[in-house]
Each structure stands twice: as C-alpha cells, then as structure tokens.
C-alpha cells in the first residue's frame, strides 16, 4: 500500500516546490487537441471596484501567462498510441506556451481521459483512542480502509476521502476536534491502466519536463464546469471529447464516480466520412459548420457541398441535404448519450438529491444537443462552459477547454487525497528512526 | 501505417508544426534566466576584456596607443586658438620689466594649457620691486601681466649698505650710495625697517629743523635718535616720540636751542628733558664760572 502512494507523494512534493517557485504548466493530452497553459502563482488578483465580479470571484491566486493549443497526434481514445508523434505535439504546445509566457517551465501537471478509469467506493472504521478526533486519527481511519482488488496492471489515480461519519452522525466534512467513539470514512478511489500513465510519464520526460501531478479528465472537467451548488447537491459532468466521453458525478463537493465512454466526436466525424464518402478533414468541416441533431423540414432544402479533391468531378461536386447529415450524426450521438446513461445508472445517479447534468467538451457545441440529451439523460440538462480564470485567452474559454481549466483549479485548489495525510505510526517498519520521530511528534 | 524506419524528409517537416528536439531544447535554454543574463552581459563583457587583454599584451600596440594619444593631445593643444604668442607687461618701469622678462619661466609662443598662471604670478610677486601682479589671458593670444611696483619711501642704511624700502619696510632695491636717492629720508640702525611708518612721521616733523637734519637712527631696536649736522643728536623716547620731537622743535624755535653748543638733547624721560653740552661749551662754562668765582673772592 505504501509504495503505491510513493509516486503520488513525490509528485505532490514537486508540485508544491514548483508552486513556491511560482510557475507551473498544465497539459491536457486529449484525442483531438493538446493544450498547454502556463500558470504563474503571484498572489491574489488585484480587484478594481468597477470591474464587477472578478474571475473566480477573487479566489484565484494564479494567472495564465501562456497558452497554446495544437492538433493532437498519436492519441486514440485518450491514450497515447504513437509516442513519438505525441511527443512532438506536446513539444509544439509547450514551446508555443513558453514563447507566449517568456518563461521556461520544468514542471507540468497532466490530464488524460483514457486508461479505462474505474471507480471504487471504499470504507474504513477506526475506534478512537481519545474521544476527540485528531489528524492522526483521520490518517488511521484512511489506513484502515479495505483495499479492493484493482486487478493486474492498475494504478490508483485519485483516492479522495469524501465523507466522514462519527458514531451515527454521517456526512461530516471535517471531523477533526469532534468527539465520538468510532470514526468511519468513505473514500472514492479511481484506478486507471498503469501502462497508460507510464506512457504519458515517459512522453513528458522525453520533453525534458517533470510530471508534478496527474489527474483524470473526468474529474477536472467536472471541477471547472459544475457550479458550486451542483457539486454540493449532486451533479454529473459529461465531457464530450474527441475520442472519449468522460462522465463524473459530484456530491458534497467531491467526485463520487468517474468513468469514461470510449466514444466521442471523432466517431461522429468518421461516420460522416463513411456515410457521405468524403475525407476526414471534410467530414470534420461539415460536422462543425452544418452539424446538428434535430432535423426539420427546412433542413431537407438546405444543401451542403461535400467538396473533395479526388479529381472525379461528379464525386467532388455532390450535394447532400442537412437532414442526411443529421441522420448520420444523430444515431451516433444518441449511442454516446445512451452509454453515458448506462454509466450514470450504474453509478446510482438517480438517488442523488439533485440530478443536474452538465454537458461540456468540444462535442457539446453541436446545435440542439441539449434537447437530445434531455430525452436520454433526464430533464435537468444544461450546457456548461469552464470557469473564468485570470489571463486565459478568449480562444481557450470554450467548452472544449473545460478539463484544461479544471486542471488549473486542480493545481491551485487541490482536494485532499489519501496521500496528503501522514502515514500512521503502525504502518512504518518497526525499529525505524522515522517511526520514533513520528511517535514523538504524535505524543507531544 | 506510417513508416517506422524512414527518415522524415524536410518536405514533410515543412507541414509539421512541431519543433525539432534541438530547437525545443535551445528555446528552453534561452528562456533560462541565468543563461540569458550570461549570454547578454557575461559573454560580451568577457569577449571585450579578452580582446583588450590580447591587444595590450603586445608592447608595440601599447606604444602605438601612447604615441597616438600624445599626438592627438599635442595637436589639440597647439591649435592657434589655444596659443599664447606675446606678453603685454603693464605698470612696470623699464628696469623692473627687464627683471620680469628675465625671470619669467615662459618662452613664447606657448600653448595656454602649458601656461601656469599661478606660477607666473608667484614668480613675479617674488620680485622685491613688485608689490602685486595680475595675470590674465586676453583674446588674441595675449598674455597680460599688470604689475604694481613698490614705491620706495625711505633709504635704509644697515650693515648691508643702502637699501631703498617702502613704507612697510619691504626692500625695493639696493642703492650704491646715499646720493642715488637724495630725495628720500634716511633711516639707519637695526630694526629700522620694522618701524618705517614711525620713522617717516618723525622725518616729516623734523622738516621744521630744515637742513640741519641728517637722518634717523634706530637705537637698540626700540627707539629713535634724530641725528643733526655737526653731530648733534636728539634722543627720543620709545613712546610718543613725535610729541617729544615737537617739544624740541618748539624749544628750538623759542630759545634757539640747537644753535647753542650742545651735543645731545635727551628727551627719553618726558618729564625731565636733559641737555648735554659739548666739551668746549662745558670748558667755557667752567672758565666763566671760575672767573665769576674769582671775582667774588677778590
């Protein structure tokens, strides 16, 4: 158990050092695009009264000083597929962001959506020695959680205590200082494929960067796209990306479920390409310019030039009606949303007090998607955009950047993870100096 | 599937926005603050220092620089605007002017950078005959020297011979003989030059006595004697010598004192003026007294 957290502890250390130095980069390795932002931690924003509400209501202590996006290469389903290609794409993004910022970054926090994330709910109990709960008691109860069998080649990505209960009082967010006899906790654990993380790590290392943290795309998209009460009362974030659709469920400001449907906008494009017999680039253009999910009578008359460069005049000069395009797009989007529905059902989403669903990601920009999603997912669906952060260029404020912006918030306001607590004394090897020091620390 | 072995051609790279590994690393290096400051200040400074060191290591180069430097310096100094071609001497009599020209450490024409005005002033004022000197450079390269000469007020006779001195006692020139300046009063004795003003005052007062006055002698460096023709002396006190002399003159005018056969009028004790008679007068007086005495006795 300890060695699993060793890497996470080290990354946390690197992240703290980097933030103390003031500059850190965030890197969103997506299937469609790779985005790099460079954050400068320079204290809270100076707020003028005539500005209105500042970004993040003045709660942010960082500023984006460099931003760059590049077309992703060598990534499929949110996983690295051709490493040298991905490395080139990361280099492109990081170099452009560095150029804009005018500073060199050495530490990077990365996110990706692949690796088949799987959620586990853990619980542990601990009988308190003293009546008041101390921080070491919290560490002990976390250590007492029974570990599920993650399976071969799986790695823990997030392990966040989401709930504490003391005797019969449940739903405590901070039990420290409270009195009781038995402390219990619920931990949400997210595991991903180890090979995927290692590939990403290796790729980042080849770019002369140091990984200072890694987060699931489902989690960070939810962090930036959901608003406070949605996170508090229960909400799901559906991040429709290029190769994957990430789903995360939030309750009481914690992620309680995260999953990923390996289907996204690229599949829609591929369907269009196959159905209309056009190139992928053309299909992408047609999708973004003319795409939709609700066909009306007007759409039968609206003809779209398919274009093409095959040299066959008859082939290149075809026209298709928009209804045909919608007829291709809609079943695939419905399929994606139905998959999302399945995941939400599996997570027990219908038991949450509020069932707000927020659609974000580049795929959520399809006109009429919210109407379609209402039919499949439930009544409370809205389109979400990421939170405003200081210094973010206008081009990077769209819904496609939800997980990128969420990663900024992950860097500046990290939630407690399991490895943020000290390891209890019992878990140190016997006769170690550290154990002695710890014993002194705890008892004085 | 893309080729794993084929080299990426430059043609393909033109469409590839990705920076090469080298350019990526170079850009990161360039953005490193330390490296950047090193390259922007350290390297130029070091290369300049290196070049200077290399250039100076050869003695010929140093000589060349020094020669060139002095050439430039000379060419600037010797521009006609800075040259002083002649001296204009004002306020000096011919002999003094000659003396000044002789001792002046300047050979015209000379650059004004090399003309030490303070030294010239000091040198000229070092002459006995010169009371003060004003030096300035006038436009047109003229060096103007305005001299105020000392005016001799008396002749001072001492062990060194005759000297003309001004009223402060400073020597103006030496005289071959008293006859050279018969118009000046003569003062004699050690320390007379320290009290010239008093001597001159007494001389003025003694004009009343006409040609009888020869001169004044300072006695014992504390008081004056007025020496008259045929060896008569008026001994004056240290204090209020002028009043004492006036009293003698009044006495002379009233009683014709000095025409009598006396050698010394002693005014040193102001409440008891004393007259010393000459030897012949004393003998005569004694004879007269004797005759009178004999007449009485007969």
Image (spheres, helix red, strand yellow):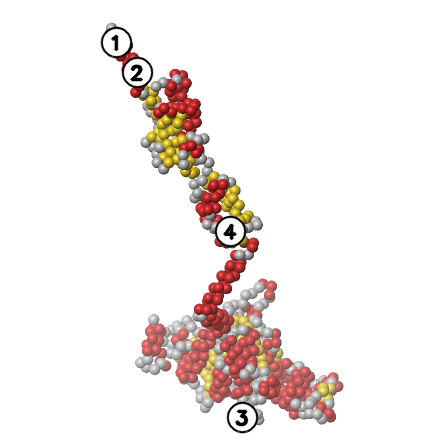
Identify the image quadrant of residue A341.
bottom right
Q: Residue at x 28, y 10 (%)?
A: B292
Q: What chain is tagged by disc 3?
A: B
Q: Nearer the viewer, mark 2 or mark 3?
A: 2
Residue B294 is labelled as 1
The correct choice, above or below, for A206 with respect to A310 in the image is above
Residue bearing the label numbered 2: B284
Quarter of the figure with the N terminus of chain B: bottom right
Residue bearing the label numbered 3: B5
Sequence-first disc among 4 and 2: 4
Residue bearing the label numbered 4: B108
Sequence-first disc among 3 and 4: 3
Spatial CA span between label 2 and label 3: 159 Å
Sequence-first disc among 1 and 3: 3
Quarter of the figure with the C terminus of chain B: top left
Q: Nearer the viewer, mark 1 or mark 3?
A: 1
Sequence-first disc among 2 and 3: 3
Determine whether the residue tagged by mark 2 lies in a helix, strand or loop: helix
């Amino acid at each position: 158990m300890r060695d699993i957290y060793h890497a996470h502890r080290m990354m946390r250390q690197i992240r703290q050092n980097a933030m103390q130095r003031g500059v850190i980069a965030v890197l969103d390795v997506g299937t469609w695009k790779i985005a790099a932002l460079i954050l400068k931690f320079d204290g809270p924003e100076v707020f003028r009264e005539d500005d209105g509400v500042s970004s993040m209501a003045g709660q942010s202590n960082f500023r984006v000083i460099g931003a760059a996006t590049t077309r992703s290469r060598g990534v499929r389903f949110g996983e690295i597929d051709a490493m040298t290609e991905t490395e080139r794409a990361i280099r492109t993004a990081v170099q452009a962001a560095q150029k804009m910022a005018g500073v060199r970054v050495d530490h990077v926090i990365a996110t990706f959506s692949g690796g088949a994330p799987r959620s586990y709910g853990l619980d542990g109990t601990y009988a308190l020695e003293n009546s008041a709960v101390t921080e070491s008691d919290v560490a002990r109860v976390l250590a007492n959680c029974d570990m599920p069998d993650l399976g071969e080649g799986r790695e823990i990505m997030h392990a966040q205590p989401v709930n504490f209960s003391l005797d019969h009082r449940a739903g405590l967010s901070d039990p420290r200082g409270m009195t009781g006899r038995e402390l219990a906790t619920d931990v949400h654990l997210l595991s991903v494929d180890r090979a995927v993380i290692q590939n990403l790590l290796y790729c980042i290392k080849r770019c002369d960067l140091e990984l200072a943290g890694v987060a699931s795309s489902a989690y960070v998209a939810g962090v930036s796209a959901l608003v406070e009460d949605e996170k508090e009362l229960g909400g799901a974030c559906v991040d429709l990306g290029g190769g994957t659709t990430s789903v995360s469920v939030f309750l009481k400001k914690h992620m309680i479920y995260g999953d990923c449907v390996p289907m996204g906008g690229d599949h829609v494009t591929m369907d269009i390409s196959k159905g209309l017999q056009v190139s992928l680039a053309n299909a992408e253009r047609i999708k973004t310019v003319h795409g939709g999910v609700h066909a009306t009578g007007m759409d039968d008359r609206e003809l779209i030039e398919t274009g093409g460069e095959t040299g066959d005049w008859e082939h290149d000069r075809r026209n298709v009606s928009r209804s045909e395009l919608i007829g291709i797009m809609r079943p695939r989007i419905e399929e994606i949303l139905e998959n999302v529905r399945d995941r939400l059902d599996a997570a027990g989403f219908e038991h949450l007090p509020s069932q707000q669903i927020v659609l974000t990601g580049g795929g959520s920009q399809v006109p009429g998607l919210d109407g379609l999603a209402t039919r499949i997912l439930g009544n409370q669906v809205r389109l979400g955009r990421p939170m405003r952060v200081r210094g973010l260029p206008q081009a990077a404020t769209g819904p496609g950047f939800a997980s990128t912006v969420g990663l900024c918030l992950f860097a500046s306001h990290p939630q407690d993870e399991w490895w943020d607590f000290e390891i209890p004394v019992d878990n140190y090897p016997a006769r170690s100096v550290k154990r002695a020091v710890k014993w002194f620390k705890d008892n004085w | 599937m893309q080729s794993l072995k084929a080299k990426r051609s430059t043609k393909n790279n033109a469409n590839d926005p990705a920076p090469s590994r080298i350019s990526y690393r170079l850009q990161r290096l360039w953005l490193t603050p330390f490296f950047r400051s090193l390259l922007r200040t350290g390297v130029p400074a070091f290369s300049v220092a290196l070049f200077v060191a290399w250039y100076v290591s050869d003695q010929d180069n140093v000589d060349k620089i020094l020669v060139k430097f002095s050439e430039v310096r000379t060419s600037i100094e010797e521009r006609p605007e800075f040259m002083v071609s002649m001296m204009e001497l004002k306020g000096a009599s011919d002999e003094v002017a000659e003396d000044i020209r002789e001792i002046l450490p300047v050979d015209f024409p000379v650059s004004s950078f090399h003309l030490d005005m303070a030294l010239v002033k000091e040198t000229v004022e070092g002459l006995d005959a010169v009371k003060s000197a004003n030096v300035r450079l006038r436009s047109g390269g003229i060096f103007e020297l305005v001299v105020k000469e000392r005016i001799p007020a008396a002749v001072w006779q001492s062990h060194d011979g005759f000297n003309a001195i001004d009223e402060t006692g400073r020597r103006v020139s030496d005289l071959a003989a008293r006859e050279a300046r018969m118009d000046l009063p003569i003062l004699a004795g050690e320390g007379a030059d320290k009290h010239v003003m008093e001597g001159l005052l007494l001389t003025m007062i003694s004009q009343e006595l006409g040609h009888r006055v020869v001169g004044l002698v300072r006695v014992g460096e504390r008081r004056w004697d007025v020496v008259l023709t045929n060896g008569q002396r008026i001994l004056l006190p240290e204090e209020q010598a002028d009043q004492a002399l006036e009293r003698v003159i009044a006495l002379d005018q009233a009683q014709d004192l000095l025409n009598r056969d006396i050698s010394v009028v002693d005014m040193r004790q102001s409440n008891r003026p004393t007259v010393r008679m000459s030897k012949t007068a004393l003998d005569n007086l004694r004879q007269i007294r004797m005759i009178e005495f004999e007449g009485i006795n007969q």
